[in-house]
Image: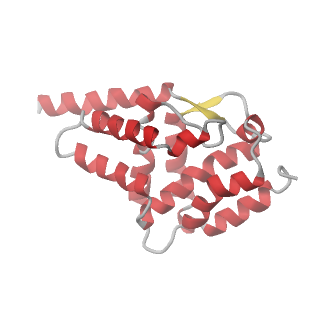
Amino acid sequence: MTVRLDQQFAFLNEADRLKSVLRATTLVDGSRPENSGEHSWHLALYALVLADHAAPGVDINRVIKMLILHDLVEIDVGDVPIHSSNGAAHASTETQVAERRAADRIFGLLPPDLGPVFRALWDEFEAAETPDAVFAKSLDRVQPVMANLMSGGGTWTTYNVTAAQLHSRVGTKIAKGAPYLWEWIKEKSKDFFK
């Protein structure tokens, strides 16, 4: 039992480092950048509140688990903003390899009955092929959009994002998992992109 607890707390203590990873996205009041721990918590809340926008059969409890775990790799890799001038790095092979290496290390801290389960949830989220993962990925794209809308443009202003870029980088993922949310967001963001 001691070894198991040592492993569980090693993982939990390592996960605390996610609070030190600053993201490009600010808090909705624009006062400061959010950290990745705050982002993950907020996404779990998004899943609870917006569950009625999930496709039939989506398991919101699994979605919440994915959202809590999905950015732990940023402890090693950092945040790679989707709209930055280096936004191509967001989906690059180099970033994906670094994230997989980070997932090996971080989930490897857990006991053998937990590590592979959490890693499988992370892999499922990254692949975004199951209904649960597709919805989770759509929420991961919705939350920063809402922060940008509430903060007067946020990273859209910082990175000179166009409506076309918003659609291609974010909208397609949101529409795949939560089509009504994307239609609503498109309407809300029209004024910004005039």
Q: How many marks?
A: 0
Q: Residue 159 at x, y = what percent?
A: 73, 37
Residue 18 in the figure: left or right of residue 178: left
Instruction: Give the side of residue 151 with respect to residue 181, left or right.
Output: right
Q: Locate residue 31: give its quadrant.
A: top right
Say whether residue 26 is visible.
no
Q: Is residue 127 something that shows in the picture?
A: yes
- Which residue appears farthest toward the right when viewing the image? 194
User: At 73% across and 33% down in the image, what residue appears?
Assistant: 30
The residue sitting at 21% across, 31% down in the picture is: 7
Instruction: Please name whichever residue, 59 or 79, is drawn nearer the observer in this view of the structure.
Output: 79
The colour scheme used here is secondary structure
Q: Residue at x 63, y 33 (%)?
A: 24
Query: Where the N terminus falls, by quadrant?
Result: top left
Rendered image quadrant of residue 9: top left
Q: Position of residue 47 (x, y in %)?
A: 52, 56
Q: Where's residue 22, x and y in %?
A: 56, 28
Q: Is residue 192 left or right of residue 117?
A: right
Q: Quadrant of residue 6?
A: top left
In the image, is 145 to the left or to the right of 163?
A: left
Instruction: Looking at the picture, tell me which residue is in the foreground, 59 or 190.
Output: 190
Q: Position of residue 65 (x, y in %)?
A: 39, 51
Vertical comparison of 17 with 63: above or below: above
Q: What residue is rendered at 50% in x and 71% in y?
A: 55
Q: State the residue lying farthest toward the bottom.
A: 56
